[in-house]
Amino acid sequence: MNKNKKIFICCTEQSGENIVFNICKRLKKYNYQIDGVCGKSSEKYFTNKYYDISLFKSLGLIEILLTIPKFIKIINKLSNKILLNDYDLVICVDSPDFNYQLAKKIKYNNYQTKIIQIVAPTVWAWRSGRAKKFSKVFNEIFTLFNFERSFFEKEGLKSTFIGHPISIIDEIDYDSNQKKNLIAFLPGSRDNEINKLFPYLEYVYEYLVANNIKGYKIFIPTLPHLFDKLTNLTKKWKIKTIISVENENNEKFYKDVFISVTCSGTASLEISKRMIPQIVIYKLNFLTFYIFSFLVSIRFANILNILSNKMIIKEIVNRNLNKKNLLDAFEILLNDQNFRDQQILEIRKYLPEIQSKTDPYEICEKRITEIISTAI
């Protein structure tokens, strides 16, 4: 009975792509036609794919500003497709600035179908006015964190808490006495993240070599389109380096990871859920960081640090990210068992605040099918 039901999905970031893949996998049994923007893993579920997420490589404010003309053209094309095909539901995933403009464009063209946003903008950190703006163009928002709901509900926007995708990751037992032989490097999921962060991972590699630290291999989980790049960057390394793109293999490797140097963001939460001690690194464009410093109202980048209002997970980011600060932090992570144990203890305390007891994708499936069944 659902053969004529059509969904448009817009996802322009890798973190969103993982959500789209898992939702589409669940929606497959309903025979919906799914069109829109996605990555390589989700495209098998799409009837019409209009753009790939690889076109959306911007990271900071300045990078985004430089690509505005390109994004305007894409928004115009996508809005025309939506209006022409009269979808039963429009689902926007992550990328709140891009998706807000797309939703606004179709809404102001008198589009009557429901539009939902999955992953809320961080209105609790900066630009709180976005909650009111979102309430004018979206019909519902799915939040990853329970505390986010109140920001949107007070503006009259229906909110559904789904929980963070890390909810479905199996927790790995943490035993401080267990011998593990992998050190993980997670350099990010975008080209420009790797370009900015990989030199710092090399500092860590050089530290391991210079100090003759034996017994460890390096493990770099990544995405297929970044495999060749990372293989080339590490080809002269003297420490055995495992670069893996297979999720099933990655889970096996994670069980042997002792510590991790992690790009800030979703990857850091995934490492936390796996009970792996870590330090977090990140670097924005200087001008982007300068502008953000006047706008952002929080002290930390990591959500667990934000929730606890203290630095559970050591962050070396932006202007503080330099060779000395990084290696000082890494040396403590590597050698101080009390530091590692305390981090995991605190992580266990705050993880429940961002997880749902039900599979987030099960919640999405249930709510999406409810909306679709009531579509005119």
Image (tube, rainbow, N blue to C red):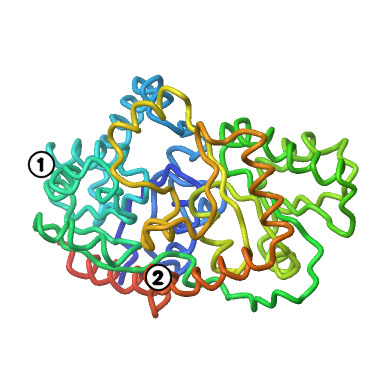
N-term mark: 1 or 2:
1
Image location (x, y in percent) of residue 15: 48, 51
Q: Is residue 162 above or below residue 68?
A: below
- Residue shown at the point (71%, 54%) measured from the top left: 184
Q: Nearer the viewer, mark 1 or mark 2?
A: 2
Cα separation, mark 1 vs mark 2, equals: 31 Å
Work out whether residue 148 or residue 345 is closer to the camera in this orientation and state it: 345
How many C-alpha atoms fall within 10 Å of the one at disc 2: few (<14), some, or many (≥20)?
Answer: many
- Residue shown at the point (19%, 35%) measured from the top left: 105
Image location (x, y in percent) of residue 375: 18, 63
Residue 129 position by quadrant = top left
How many C-alpha atoms fall within 10 Å of the one at disc 1: few (<14), some, or many (≥20)?
Answer: few
Work out whether residue 191 or residue 11 is closer to the camera in this orientation and state it: 191
Which disc, if any, is residue 40?
none
Callout 1 secondary element: loop
Image location (x, y in percent) of residue 272: 55, 64
Image location (x, y in percent) of residue 137: 15, 46
Name which residue type carries label 1.
Asn
- Residue shown at the point (45%, 67%) measured from the top left: 28
Looking at the rendered structure, the number of numbered marks drawn on it comes to 2
Quarter occupied by the C terminus: bottom left
Quarter occupied by the N terminus: bottom left
- Residue at image mark 2: 360
Q: Is residue 330 above or below residue 286?
A: below
Residue 139 position by quadrant = bottom left
Name which residue type carries label 2.
Pro
- Residue at image mark 1: 110
- Residue shown at the point (39%, 67%) measured from the top left: 354
Residue 251 position by quadrant = bottom right
Callout 2 secondary element: helix
